[in-house]
């Protein structure tokens, strides 16, 4: 049975520690004997971001002193007598009693709680002070740029202007901690995860379960030149899945992180391989040397793809999608545009091209905040 009671300071500290370690709402709720909705309500005011530790001024009354004041009132002591016992000025004790309901209503716990609340002096963040910077951040968020991309782009665009530099953490906090009143809550819809509160980076994802591919060449046999990303032309691919058996072929180039998308009516191996062949023929041979895929059966006919394009295909180890890191990250980016449960068949190839173009024009931290389009254009120019 659940009880509608709050959290003590010790419980709150433990709750936040569990959240930082990546525990889910239900798991934390079970540990405290509370429903997950209660845990969410405790995390929500600060957007899932651990509040900074607060400290009392050495001049402020402590909880123990307030309890002594309460006991002194019950015993009928005068204000001056209570003050002498505490070693405080009589005016300090008098004001403390007056601001908390007077002699007849003074309660130590309530007075201490109110003192903590009134002691808050929130410092306005940079986005609250600089309106022009705030508007620039808002425009980039509306273009589905991540806070880290925005911060990196600003640093690159205004290297000598400190006023135009803002950390990605400040942007996240301005979004999730709505008490700041800096960025509108609606802008959170443009974040990749669209979560109402921020998750711990330690939260783990479920392993991907895939089938077996005949005559698959293991990723372990992939040349070293592919591994270090120094040479362009090596791609990673996958299927992005939607509702009603709808799919999109996703391709990302490892050196530049350049993305291409292809509409497919189903995930049959003939359909997917045909789409991959069409995409391969759009590029110079120097810019399509290999393809790495997971263990999805949609690439069972990989030999035909290699025969018609002269492109080597490598497959990840079973249940190891992380070996295609660029593809996994790209799919997470694409979920901003194509959330899980969406019918992907409704999107035309022209719409897919528009999404790919927008992704390719976004700066990337791993590219020193160049965009994939910039980096890929340099590769194309080098082949010419």
Image: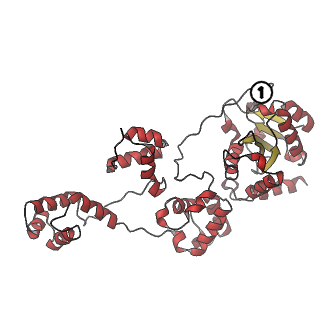
Q: Position of residue 263 (x, y in %)?
A: 81, 46
The local secondary structure at tag 1 comes to loop
Left or right: residue 192 compared with residue 89: right
Pointer 1: residues within 10 angstroms few (<14), some, or many (20+)? Answer: some
Q: Nearer the viewer, residue 9 or 222?
A: 9
Q: Quadrant of the C terminus?
A: bottom right
Give the residue drawn at x 81%, y 54%: 353
Q: Position of residue 86 (x, y in %)?
A: 14, 63
Instruction: Report the number of numbered marks.
Output: 1
Color theme of the render: secondary structure
Tell me the residue that label 1 is attached to.
213
Q: Is residue 238 above or below residue 75?
A: above
Left or right: residue 215 compared with residue 17: right
Q: Quadrant of the N terminus?
A: top left
Residue 230, can we see it? no
Q: Position of residue 9 (x, y in %)?
A: 32, 51
Q: Quadrant of residue 378?
A: bottom right
Q: Position of residue 75 (x, y in %)?
A: 7, 60
Give the residue drawn at x 87%, y 57%: 381
Q: Quadrant of residue 157?
A: bottom right
Residue 106, can we see it? yes
Q: Nearer the viewer, residue 16 or 101?
A: 101
Give the residue drawn at x 58%, y 71%: 162
Give the residue drawn at x 41%, y 38%: 30
Q: Is residue 143 above or below residue 314?
A: below
């Amino acid at each position: 049975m659940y009880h509608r009671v709050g959290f003590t300071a010790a419980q709150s500290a433990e709750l936040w520690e569990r959240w930082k370690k990546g525990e889910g709402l239900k798991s934390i709720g079970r540990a405290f004997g509370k429903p997950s909705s209660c845990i969410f309500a405790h995390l929500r005011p600060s957007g899932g971001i651990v509040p900074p530790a607060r400290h009392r001024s050495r001049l402020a009354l402590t909880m123990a002193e307030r309890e002594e004041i309460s006991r002194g009132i019950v015993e009928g002591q005068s204000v001056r007598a209570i003050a002498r016992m505490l070693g405080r000025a009589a005016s300090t004790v008098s004001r403390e009693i007056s601001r908390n309901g007077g002699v007849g209503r003074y309660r130590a716990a309530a007075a201490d709680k109110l003192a903590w609340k009134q002691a808050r002096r929130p410092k306005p963040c940079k986005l609250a002070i600089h309106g022009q910077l705030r508007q620039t951040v808002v425009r980039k968020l509306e273009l589905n740029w991540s806070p880290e991309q925005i911060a990196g782009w600003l640093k690159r665009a205004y290297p000598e202007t400190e006023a135009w530099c803002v950390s990605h953490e400040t942007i996240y906090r301005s979004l999730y901690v709505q008490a700041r009143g800096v960025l509108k809550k609606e802008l959170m819809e443009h974040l990749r995860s669209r979560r109402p509160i921020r998750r711990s980076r330690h939260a783990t994802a479920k392993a991907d379960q895939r089938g077996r591919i005949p005559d698959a060449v293991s990723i372990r046999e992939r040349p070293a030149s592919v591994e270090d990303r120094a040479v362009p032309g090596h791609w990673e691919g996958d299927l992005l899945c939607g509702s009603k058996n709808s799919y999109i072929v996703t391709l990302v180039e490892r050196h530049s992180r350049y993305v291409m998308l292809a509409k497919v009516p189903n995930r049959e191996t003939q359909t997917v391989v045909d789409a991959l062949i069409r995409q391969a023929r759009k590029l110079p041979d120097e810019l399509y040397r290999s393809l790495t895929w997971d263990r999805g059966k949609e690439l069972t006919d990989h030999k035909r793809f290699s025969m018609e394009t002269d492109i080597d295909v490598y497959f990840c180890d079973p249940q190891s999608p992380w070996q295609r890191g660029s593809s996994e990250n790209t799919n997470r980016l694409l979920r901003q545009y194509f959330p899980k449960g969406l019918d992907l068949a409704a999107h035309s190839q022209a719409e897919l091209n528009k999404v790919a173009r927008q992704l390719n024009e976004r700066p990337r931290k791993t590219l020193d905040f160049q965009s994939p389009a910039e980096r890929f254009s340099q590769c194309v120019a080098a082949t010419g």
